[in-house]
Amino acid sequence: MKLKIRDMKTKTEHLVIQVSLKLVLISLLLFLFSSVAISQQSAGFTSFKPGGEWLAEDGVHIDCHGGNIIYVESLKTYYWYGEHRGQPRGASCYSSKDLYNWRKEGVVLEKGDIQTFERPKVIYDEINKRYVMWFHYDGNNYTIAELGIAVSDSPTGPFIIKDHYRPNGHESRDIGMYFDPGTKKAYIGYAADHTNLTIRMVELSSDYLSITSNDVDIKAHCEGPGILKKGGIFYLLTSGCSGWTPNPATYYTAPDIMGPYTDQGHPFTGDAGNNSFNSQPCYIFKIPGYKDAYLYMGDRWNGGGRPDSQYVFLPITITEDGKMELHWYNEWDLSIFTPERTRPAR
Ligand code: GAL
């Protein structure tokens, strides 16, 4: 009996040793796997490097062009939408807590058989808890020239296409969007008739799902419209019209979003190449939590609009005498702006 008990003890001891060895092995493997995963992720960014290589958290180039950024207060998250120019073509979405480091949320709308899908702009409808995407819907030759609209219940899609049409009968190609936080109204500025010889501004319905008849020719010109408002003045920034090749941008000012707009010339200061620091505007994002923090979002298409096109993100300055200026920085961060008293939590 004594012997049997000793045998059992030895067996148990062997079992414990075996299990422990297995656990050590599993932990080692897990550690190795996680190290590989970490080494494939991008390093934590703490600044913007305009025109530089910008990787998402998965270590892959961010593929999100011609779009916009929104901040969803309830989720304390920034969402960046844009053209996914790799496969599948459509709209991509990335999320971030700090504007420097982005996680790919995926392709939130696949363009399917739409020939040209460009410049998506998303707005969050706080009342109906819906995300509404407007985009440039077109054919290969840019002669259809329509606005498209898609909707999702979640910021990360999927967005379902609801409609596409010419706004109030006008051609519509490159689009910009402006959301007025005071009135909660939203507007689309669109490169319009006679193949972008005019820009029109149209007010959206209160649920952002349709356009209204408040739609005017704002006597501005060309493409890539971005809009900001400071001290009761509206600033409209537009590129010239030279396809994927960058050109000098122009800005206009107006006392009302619907105009009249006055041409104020080129805002890119020290722009040796006379090409908006080799970029084309796509949006101006007012960064919440900082005073007058206007983020210029520009695309560096490299003459081709490829998936690996870079981004030129720069701060926009409105000077004491009301001029818009953009200066070049090889690297910059949000400390350039003055924080407001309440900042969104990180
Ligand atoms: C640009 C426009 C882009 C794209 C390109 C095609 O002028 O801003 O969004 O349409 O032309 O050539």
Image (cartoon, rainbow, N blue to C red):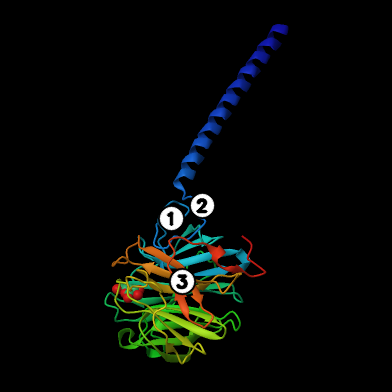
Q: Which corner quadrant of the figure contains ligand 1?
A: bottom left
Quickly name the residue at label 3.
296
* Mark 1 C-beta to ligand 1 under 8 Å: no
Quarter of the image where one finds residue 298:
bottom left
Front label number (1 vs 3): 3
Q: Earlier in the sequence, mark 1 or mark 2?
A: 2
- Front in this rendered view, residue 100 or 4: 100
| Amino acid marked by disc 2 | Gly
- Percent of width and height locating residue 205: 53, 85
Indicate the quadrant containing the N terminus: top left, top right, bottom left or bottom right: top right
| Amino acid marked by disc 1 | Leu
Can residue 109 be seen here? The reply is no
| Amino acid marked by disc 3 | Tyr
116 to the left or right of 13: left
Residue 69 image label: none
Can residue 18 be seen here? The reply is yes
State the CA–CA distance, disc 1 to disc 3: 19 Å
State the CA–CA distance, disc 1 to disc 2: 10 Å
Quickly name the residue at label 2.
44
Q: Name the secondary structure under disc 1.
A: loop
**Residues at circles 1 and 3 in contact by the CB criterion of under 8 Å:** no
Q: Earlier in the sequence, mark 1 or mark 3?
A: 1
Quickly name the residue at label 1.
55
- Percent of width and height locating residue 325: 46, 76
Residue farthest left in this picture? 141
Q: Name the secondary structure under disc 2.
A: loop
